[in-house]
């Protein structure tokens, strides 16, 4: 089983480490021909406008959309969540996403860097205490379609109740960065999704 | 019980400050002096822009005291783009930093490119919610800045020259000093800390992990896609480009080329492709021709 981390820009190494710590085989991918062998893909945190720009320039947009349509499990954190959204608010006018999750995501929704924060988020599908979540110029989910499962919301503070973790089919997205905290539960959950998907093929 | 455990969101933590730099990795941060330049940078795929009044090459040419930018100019740039905006404060000038934090700047660069405000002390960066990036020419300097609260380090190079030689020297020096630490037996780390003029705990951490506890970019003299790619191959986690873009013949194309070369830094085929037809690079000036007192990298202690 081979999981790729999209390495156009962002915290690629942290995702590779988290996946490896979960026992998965993980590698950085940057080219269309590297997608073919993948059983799963992670779109990391970073700057979504930069990822969009480079994904267009290097011909990754359509190949990744095709793999998503074919059921490839994909997990996106922060910028990765934006890249998986069908609709982006406060993006650049020419900003492209892979899409796949029927949701409206607002970019930089919590504010600027001085508003970035850490706080608790309870995730329905994960056992144990709420996750300690790190939000960095993070997006939130403003609306979700009927097939989207809301998995977690901000628990306290001025943004309490905002949706920050969702799943639709084989696509998983969080507005925060579990790859930074050493808590592997979200990555384990995704690796299980990849296992199950591979078993069904 | 921590704030987070009580469900009160905590801002300005080390995790949040250092994490912001993690998100910039593999990216290019570009110096801009107008909202129009900021838009060109964003269009080209910059991960952030550095708002300043004059690029280092002009600071060098025009001389005089160089200070924090006009808040109107910073507001204009913040309004023009959706990517993070950084801005420079003078070394030790904590009030300039307070103003930049109030303006909503996403990262403050306590920078040797501006005229220092304090020749003994740097800013106490722990006292701020906004994160700081600081320059370093060697490991001791980097660790002292981290001790003061810097959440990101950039090797200094020699800003405003278009000469990459000091960037390579500083990056190689820092990486070599880290490698040396990892090879030392534990009982020699005490003396290593003394020699580095850095706290023992931090020295021990670097010796154990083989890397700085914060992200390290490169800066100072990067003018071409190949320069950026070389610095990435030497171990930089991302690139600051100052005068190199908007002092060149075709800024939009050069900016985009440097972004692509940074991502594909280990692929000469991509670097060759993006290097074609870029037009004039900044003319530049050899660091050796800059008289010692005018070398910016020597500011900071």
Image: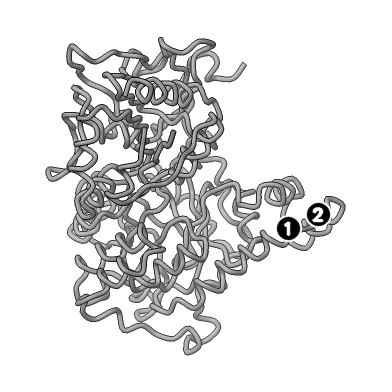
Whether residues under marks 1 and 2 lie with C-beta atoms below 8 angstroms apart, the answer is yes
Q: Quadrant of residue B284?
A: bottom left
Q: Position of residue B265 (x, y in %)?
A: 39, 63
Which numbered dot is residue B148? Answer: none
- Most extreme residue toward the left is A93
In the picture of the structure, the residue carrying the numbered disc 2 is B189
Label 2 sits on a secondary structure element that is: helix
Q: Position of residue A126 (x, y in %)?
A: 46, 13
Give the mark nearer the N terminus: 1 vs 2: 1
B240 lies above or below A171: below
Q: Residue at x 43, y 44 (%)?
A: A12
Please tell me if label 1 and label 2 are on a single chain.
yes
Q: Residue at x 20, y 36 (%)?
A: A65
Color theme of the render: one colour
Q: Is residue B301 visible?
A: no
Q: State left or right for residue B3 relative to residue A66.
A: right
- Most extreme residue toward the bottom is B289
Q: State left or right for residue B20 relative to residue A81.
A: right
Q: Position of residue B217 (x, y in %)?
A: 47, 58
Q: Position of residue B32 (x, y in %)?
A: 28, 61
Return the residue nearer the eye: B17 or A149. Answer: A149
Q: Quadrant of residue B257?
A: bottom left
- Most extreme residue toward the right is B187
B271 lies above or below A88: below
Q: Is residue A23 visible?
A: yes
Q: Dot 2, how many residues are within 10 Å of its Cα: few (below 14), some (14-19), or many (20+)? A: some
Label 2 chain ID: B
B137 lies above or below B151: below
Q: Residue at x 46, y 24 (%)?
A: A133
In the picture of the structure, the residue carrying the numbered disc 1 is B181
Q: Dot 1, how many residues are within 10 Å of its Cα: few (below 14), some (14-19), or many (20+)? A: many
């Amino acid at each position: 089983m081979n999981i790729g981390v999209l390495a156009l820009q962002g915290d690629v190494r942290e995702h590779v480490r988290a996946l490896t710590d979960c026992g998965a085989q993980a590698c950085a991918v940057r080219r269309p021909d590297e997608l073919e062998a993948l059983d799963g893909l992670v779109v990391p945190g970073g700057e979504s406008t930069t990822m969009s720009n480079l994904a267009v320039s290097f011909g990754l947009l359509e190949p990744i959309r095709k793999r998503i349509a074919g059921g490839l499990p994909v997990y996106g954190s922060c910028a990765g969540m934006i890249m998986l959204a069908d609709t982006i608010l406060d993006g650049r006018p020419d900003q492209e996403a892979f899409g796949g999750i029927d949701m409206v995501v607002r970019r930089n929704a919590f504010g600027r860097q001085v508003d970035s924060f850490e706080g608790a988020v309870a995730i329905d599908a994960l056992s144990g205490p709420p996750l300690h979540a790190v939000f960095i110029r993070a997006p939130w989910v403003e609306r979700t379609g009927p097939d989207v499962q809301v998995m977690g919301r901000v628990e306290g503070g001025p943004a309490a109740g905002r949706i920050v973790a969702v799943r639709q089919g084989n696509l998983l997205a969080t507005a925060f960065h579990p790859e930074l905290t050493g808590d592997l539960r979200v990555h384990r959950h995704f690796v299980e999704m990849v296992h199950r998907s591979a078993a069904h093929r | 019980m921590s704030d987070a455990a009580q469900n009160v969101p905590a801002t300005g933590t080390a995790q949040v400050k250092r994490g912001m730099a993690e998100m910039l990795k593999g990216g290019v941060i570009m110096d801009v002096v107008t909202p129009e330049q900021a838009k060109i940078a964003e269009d080209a795929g910059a991960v952030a822009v550095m708002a300043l009044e004059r690029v280092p090459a002009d600071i060098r040419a025009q001389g005089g005291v160089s200070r924090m930018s006009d808040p109107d100019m910073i507001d204009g740039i913040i309004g023009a783009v959706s990517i993070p905006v950084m801005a420079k404060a003078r070394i030790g000038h904590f009030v300039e930093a307070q103003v930049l934090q109030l303006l909503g700047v996403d990262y403050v660069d306590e920078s040797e490119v501006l005229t220092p405000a304090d020749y003994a002390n740097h800013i106490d960066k722990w006292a701020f919610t906004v994160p700081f990036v600081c320059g370093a020419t060697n490991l001791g300097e980097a660790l002292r800045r981290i001790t003061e609260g810097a959440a990101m380090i950039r090797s200094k190079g020699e800003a405003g020259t278009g000469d990459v030689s000091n960037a390579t020297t500083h990056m190689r020096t820092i990486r070599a000093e880290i490698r040396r630490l990892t090879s030392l037996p534990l009982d020699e780390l005490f003396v290593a800390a003394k020699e580095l003029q850095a706290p023992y705990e931090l020295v021990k951490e670097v010796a154990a992990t083989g890397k700085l506890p914060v992200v390290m970019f490169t800066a100072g003299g990067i003018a071409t896609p190949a320069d950026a790619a070389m610095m990435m191959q030497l171990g930089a986690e991302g690139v600051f480009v100052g005068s190199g873009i908007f002092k060149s013949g075709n800024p939009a194309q050069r900016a985009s080329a440097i972004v692509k070369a940074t991502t594909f830094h280990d692929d000469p085929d991509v670097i060759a492709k993006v290097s074609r037809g870029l037009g004039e690079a900044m003319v530049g000036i050899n660091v050796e021709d800059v008289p010692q007192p005018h070398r910016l990298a020597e500011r900071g202690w």
